[in-house]
């Protein structure tokens, strides 16, 4: 490592139980766990740092990784004969994660900033990061699904996405795929916290104020629509599941948000509480807007994909809400552009800033795509459900379930019930995407 004169570095990889004995590739890290790590030598020129040009791991380093995994199978997990001695194991701040894709990422720190946030701060950070423009389409989604079906779908999707997020937190192997995204997404979650929080709180105030003034307008018709009321159960409910996949999406940065929790043993509890708050927020906004929509004289089918569009342009409170949302987008849009530049140009050209010409072209494509969508397909609900179902298929449904299945298979702990359950989750994700094109 840094204190060695030889032309090599160590990469710690764990062969212990992924859930019962966490190590430095898991956010629930304790320094004492270093005793269970094997060293992995990689030449310094092949180490990838997220802030530098991406380089490939050498063939020798890749072969060493396979050799160590082979050695680990020569004895039982309880046998410590092949575990490296403590004096050659790297310090926590010097650990690298080897990727089967051919790169090794330095974990920026498991000790740097460790324990800065209380559980309360962590919970509201997750709540704030998960809140986005998808909240504007929740009332429309409930209308598409029906009032009763909509509330049930919100609760069920919240539970399903929570479980998949829990699998991300518990799976060390997920670090191979999402660590680079997590590090970049830290910028988004920290810099956009204040505008996002203010916008959501103001929307809650606006919805509450309008509901008090308008009152509730509800009639329960289970299957047959009437002149002003939609049925309680509608077969368009997959449109709401597409919206909710994006609304509950935080899987690509959850490790970053949790790793600074002061009490790492409370990570799962804090994650559950945060998801509960997000679910209640969506239910509160969706139910109040749907219930207070003035029927008669207007039909519930008149609820727009962006519920702010139902207010007249002369409404002062809705105008202020749009100003808050505009300010929020002005702060997050450049950061999203930076995220796209780091991810795209870094992987294609090996440099996150190859030239001003490359960055200019990328920015024109990003801005142009937004302008074209606004001109020819200004349907926020449709955009959210398509993008949510597409992105969620990989990050919410497939990656957590598939890697958990592979992990259990490698440890010879895979059972038929677990296999069937997680394959069913993957099938749900595929069906969620396909059905969006038929609604």
Image (spheres, helix red, strand yellow):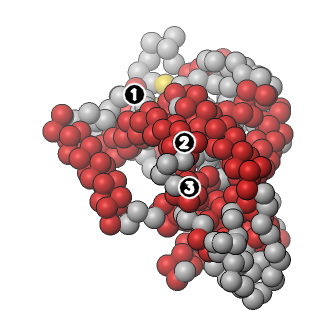
1, above or below 331, in the image: above
90, above or below 302, in the image: above
In terms of image quadrants, where is residue 379? bottom left
In terms of image quadrants, where is residue 311? bottom right
Give the labeled residue for mark 3: 311
Q: Which quarter of the image is occupied by the C terminus? A: bottom right
Task: State the CA–CA distance, disc 3 to disc 1.
Answer: 46 Å
Task: Please state the horizontal and vertical placement of residue 231, each as a whole percent of the image.
Answer: 74, 81
**Helix, strand, or loop for circle 2?**
helix
Mark 3 crowdedness (10 Å alpha carbons): few <14, some 14-19, many ≥20 = few
| Residue visible at 73% across and 26% down in the picture | 121
Task: State the CA–CA distance, disc 2 to disc 3.
Answer: 10 Å
**Helix, strand, or loop for circle 3?**
loop
Between 427 and 414, the one lying in front of the other is 427
Which mark sits nearer the N-terminus, 3 or 1?
Answer: 1
Left or right of 74 on screen, residue 251: left
| Residue visible at 60% across and 67% down in the picture | 303
Q: Are marks 3 and 1 in contact (CB under 8 Å)?
A: no
Left or right of 325 on screen, residue 338: left
């Amino acid at each position: 490592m840094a204190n060695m004169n030889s032309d090599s570095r160590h990469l710690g990889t764990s062969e212990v139980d992924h859930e019962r004995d966490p190590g430095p590739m898991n956010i629930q890290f304790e320094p004492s766990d270093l005793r269970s790590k094997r060293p992995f030598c990689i030449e310094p020129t092949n180490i990838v740092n997220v802030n530098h040009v991406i380089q490939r791991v050498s063939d020798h380093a890749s072969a060493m990784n396979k050799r160590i995994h082979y050695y680990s199978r020569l004895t039982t997990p309880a046998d410590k004969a092949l575990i490296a001695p403590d004096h050659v194991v790297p310090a926590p701040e010097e650990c690298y994660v080897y990727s089967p894709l051919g790169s090794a990422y330095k974990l920026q720190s498991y000790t740097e900033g460790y324990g800065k946030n209380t559980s309360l701060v962590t919970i509201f950070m997750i709540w704030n990061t998960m809140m986005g423009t998808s909240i504007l389409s929740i009332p429309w989604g409930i209308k598409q699904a029906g009032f009763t079906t909509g509330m049930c779908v919100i609760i069920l999707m919240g539970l399903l996405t929570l479980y998949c997020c829990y699998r991300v937190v518990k799976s060390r192997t997920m670090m191979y795929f999402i660590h680079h995204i997590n590090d970049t997404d830290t910028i988004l979650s920290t810099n956009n916290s204040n505008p996002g929080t203010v916008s959501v709180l103001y929307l809650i105030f606006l919805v509450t104020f309008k509901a008090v003034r308008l009152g509730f307008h509800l009639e329960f018709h289970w299957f047959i629509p009437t002149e002003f009321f939609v049925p309680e159960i509608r077969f368009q409910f997959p449109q709401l599941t597409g919206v909710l996949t994006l609304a509950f999406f935080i899987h690509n940065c959850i490790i970053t948000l949790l790793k600074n929790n002061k009490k790492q043993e409370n990570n799962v509890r804090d994650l559950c509480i945060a998801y509960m708050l997000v679910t209640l927020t969506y239910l509160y906004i969706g139910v109040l807007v749907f219930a207070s929509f003035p029927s008669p004289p207007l039909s519930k089918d008149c609820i727009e994909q962006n519920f702010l569009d139902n207010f007249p342009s002369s409404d002062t409170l809705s105008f202020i809400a749009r100003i808050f949302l505009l300010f929020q987008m002005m702060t997050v849009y450049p950061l999203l552009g930076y995220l796209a530049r780091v991810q795209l140009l870094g992987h294609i050209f090996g440099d996150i800033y190859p030239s001003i010409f490359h960055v200019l072209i990328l920015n024109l494509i990003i801005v142009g795509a937004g302008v074209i969508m606004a001109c020819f397909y200004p349907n926020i609900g449709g955009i959210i459900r398509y993008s949510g179902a597409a992105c969620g298929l990989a990050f919410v449904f497939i990656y957590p379930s598939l890697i958990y299945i592979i992990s259990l298979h490698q440890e010879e702990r895979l059972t038929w019930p677990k296999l069937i359950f997680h394959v069913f989750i993957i099938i749900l994700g595929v069906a969620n995407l396909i059905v969006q094109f038929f609604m």
